[in-house]
Image (spheres, coloured by chain):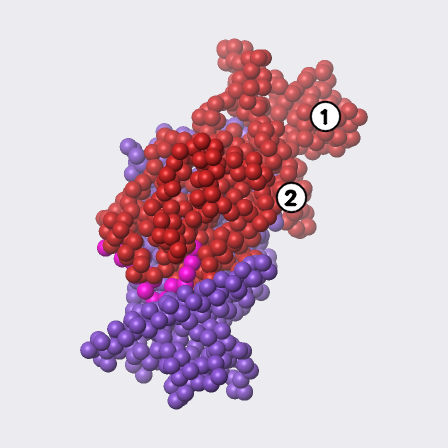
Chain colours: A purple, B red
Amino acid sequence: MTKDGVQGAAEETDQAQSKKGLKKQQKEAEKAAKKAEKQAKLAADQQTTDEDDFAKDRYGVSPMVQSSQRLGKQCFLVLRQQQFNVQALVAVGERASKQMVKFAANINKESIVDVEAVVRKVEQKIESCSQQDVELHVERIFVISQAEPRLPLQLEDCVRPEGEGDEDGRATVNQDTRLDNRVIDLRTTTSQAIFRLQSGVCQLFRDTLMNKGFVEIQTPKIISAASEGGANVFTVSYFKTSAYLAQSPQLYKQMCICADFDKVFCVGPVFRAEDSNTHRHLTEFVGLDIELAFNYHYHEVIESITDTMVQIFKGLRDKFQTEIQTVGKQFPSEPFKFLEPTLRLEYQEGVAMLREAGVEMGDEEDLSTPNEKLLGRLVKEKYDTDFYVLDKYPLAVRPFYTMPDPTDNKYSNSYDMFMRGEEILSGAQRIHDAQLLTERAIHHNIDLEKIKAYIDSFRFGAPPHGGGGIGLERVCMLYLGLHNVRQTSMFPRDPKRLTP
Amino acid sequence: MTKDGVQGAAEETDQAQSKKGLKKQQKEAEKAAKKAEKQAKLAADQQTTDEDDFAKDRYGVSPMVQSSQRLGKQCFLVLRQQQFNVQALVAVGERASKQMVKFAANINKESIVDVEAVVRKVEQKIESCSQQDVELHVERIFVISQAEPRLPLQLEDCVRPEGEGDEDGRATVNQDTRLDNRVIDLRTTTSQAIFRLQSGVCQLFRDTLMNKGFVEIQTPKIISAASEGGANVFTVSYFKTSAYLAQSPQLYKQMCICADFDKVFCVGPVFRAEDSNTHRHLTEFVGLDIELAFNYHYHEVIESITDTMVQIFKGLRDKFQTEIQTVGKQFPSEPFKFLEPTLRLEYQEGVAMLREAGVEMGDEEDLSTPNEKLLGRLVKEKYDTDFYVLDKYPLAVRPFYTMPDPTDNKYSNSYDMFMRGEEILSGAQRIHDAQLLTERAIHHNIDLEKIKAYIDSFRFGAPPHGGGGIGLERVCMLYLGLHNVRQTSMFPRDPKRLTP
């Protein structure tokens, strides 16, 4: 019988507990035990009521559930706590009665229990559990939270690798069903691993930048003017007027650079009202944003960002092997490869490689998604890396605030970064001169009145600077070799999904 | 002449620069120097154009600005980089011509310059600079970004302590003017210190929780149903339907707890469509949110949060003295005091203290803002602490999902935390039982259909849990003893301000 967690064991992992707290807890444990006993009784009573259900033998999920075996006077449970689980035995003896064994055997799957037990070595490895060398011999067991007997989906169906079990006719769970029941879907070892790794990406990102002397900033999400021209922006009712949701923190990052902060980063939601229903688009995602002043050349910015990415890749490789392997069990993929220093190709080189592979495209044409992916494969073949920078994009395909290449006006000081052939970052040197910025805005037919505050930010001393924005969910998806960004967004938002 | 920063010196603080990078930079420096020379010429040309202005002698701000003295053949500049500044001397000699001195003397204030100079000890301390024992003897100087000659506000007016200089008729800058010109206002030593300290609060918050085994989560800001009953919520147009901006991540934090994450935190924007124009309300602010499962008693949650706050206070005290003292120069305040362990009072004790001080209020009445402040003063007098917890609020004044006190239904397992008498956190044990939650929602006249997904989250095993949400801007404001939350929000949003 699979239970949701071992409450009693949680204590051991809480390193922050003071001794005083522990003593207090002991006292309170007695109180709580009494309370729990009451609750258990209540739960048992409720079960009796369930037995009045005339259809009880006709449901698909039996109250006697998988992983539990009644061997006369004992029963086995599997207790889970986050990514880990352990076998537990309740056997009639000095510390357990027949009724207690029956009670334990009847606890609904996914219920939360409080257990007091002796840890015993086992002779034969328990293959089905993460803790294979020991089992728990239960001496006390209390239900803390009783799960309803019917679960909307089964955890074992959620973690089954694609294709596996098809011939046995075992259920698989489609993505929408999972997302509709995200609270349960997030309990799988795969989900637990994905989101622990995601938490790690954020931490590695920030720690690396803090060590480089960056300052973390908080930028507003409700803004008065659409930052990038007005398309694909969500509108908000703001008291008697209306406002927009920021499509990126770019304007604010740049203002901080103009305000002397030198190197800044922020982690926060960005919003895109784009009606794209693809595997890699979300209407709300988490942006890891960087902006920094540089001394002589915007390649200082590229080096700062690629080094940050490399520190993230190394940190994941070194500290998150358990998570990577857990996800790999359900979604196998090649380990993520990267070079040091990071490979930097110029746009024209990329176009040449594509043409050599038979693609027809113009010099100043943007890369289509299939061409990006193809180029990723070509780069992997030639350079053996899953991460690279494509530099010097055609000026025509970049936003108006992008610094033109000083030697060839057809190109620009801008770049994208790719993981496994998909874009995870877009960035550039920004124009820090109010006059040039005005010229470029006019060239793009942008209403100057609307971006006046932005342009004015550069009138009172503005250092040369550049940066970029990284999509957190994409980084996690591509690092793990997954194929849908909804797998790495806890509660994804797309044009068709607003819940849960 | 005050300049905005020393570009050349920036290199020294960039610890991440590789040797290879430095070599490259040297080469590029030569390139850049040529480019800068050109720019400087351009800038000089522009100045000539400015001189054509017939009214040039009638402006309030002279091109010969404060801190610069022309002593025949030399001129002094003050160069600033973030919180630090240093005096620089350009003197006619082997490395500088008369024209070069003239050029340097005429650079507009707040321009960004690239300087090559020899660092020399000085005999008399330079009181006006942060670097008091040395000055720079300039050998090369290039303008990287020329500021316009008229600044919308003067930095020295922005950092002047209130009241100081009033008798001399010196200008002070009101808050709206500062916020309208935030890019310049953020350059003051005070602003630089405030936002570096704010970055520190976020880092200390996360590091403390990571060490306690918490997982960072990312929760959606666009939600389909207003989480707390529907009042004070911003509406968003979402394709063909409409949605809301999350007033807190609470529902999602709780779902993560139900999904086995045990202990979670998040840092992100929260939105309140409240038409409050006070010193402490913003329509968008940054929430530092915590939620955790506990074993026996919700005081485990309180202890976890108060310990986190104490770690933040200690970290600020130990690592941010420069920033605290910098802010104190403009806004003097008493050092922030706290106790270990944190003082916890029950609501009834607080009410008794207020009554003793002459306040008339009912047992189940909420605290008004003035009474909160008064209680803060009484607590400070009695216990000598600026931080404490008020526990066991009346059930009637808390949200429907608050766990009632098991011994007295008039009260609840909920708490607020205060800094210098102002609330910075509100939290509680949450109801983790679907049935009790339903009862409480009905009691509060909440439409069950609208919170169905929320209630259903607790049907499949939910551990007892609690948490709270901290307002980042308030923590910074109150720690530093400031009096307006707009001072600790980089780009504040209130019912009347949406820009910049």
Residue lying at the far left of the rendered structure: A54
**What's the residue at 42%, 82% (across, down)?**
A97
Query: Label 2 vs label 1: CA separation?
Result: 27 Å
Please give the count of numbered marks on the rendered protein. 2
Instruction: Give the residue type at disc 1.
Output: Ile
- Does A221 sit left or right of B206 as displayed? left
The residue tagged with tag 2: helix, strand or loop? helix
Q: Residues within 10 Å of mark 2 (few under 14, many from 20)?
A: few
Q: Is residue B343 magenta?
A: no
**What's the residue at 36%, 63% (across, down)?**
A183
Evaluate whether residue A301 shows in this view: no
| Residue at mark 2 | B318
- Does A82 sit left or right of B166 as displayed? left
Instruction: Give the residue type at disc 2.
Output: Asp
Q: Residues within 10 Å of mark 1 (few under 14, many from 20)?
A: some
Q: Position of residue B354 (x, y in %)?
A: 46, 36
Q: Do the numbered discs 2 and 1 sit on residues whose CB atoms are within 8 Å? A: no
The earlier-in-sequence mark between 2 and 1 is 1
| Residue at mark 1 | B126
Nearest to the observer: residue B335 or residue A289: B335
Q: Which residues are magenta?
A: B449-466
Q: Position of residue B36 (x, y in %)?
A: 60, 33
Residue B443's disc is none
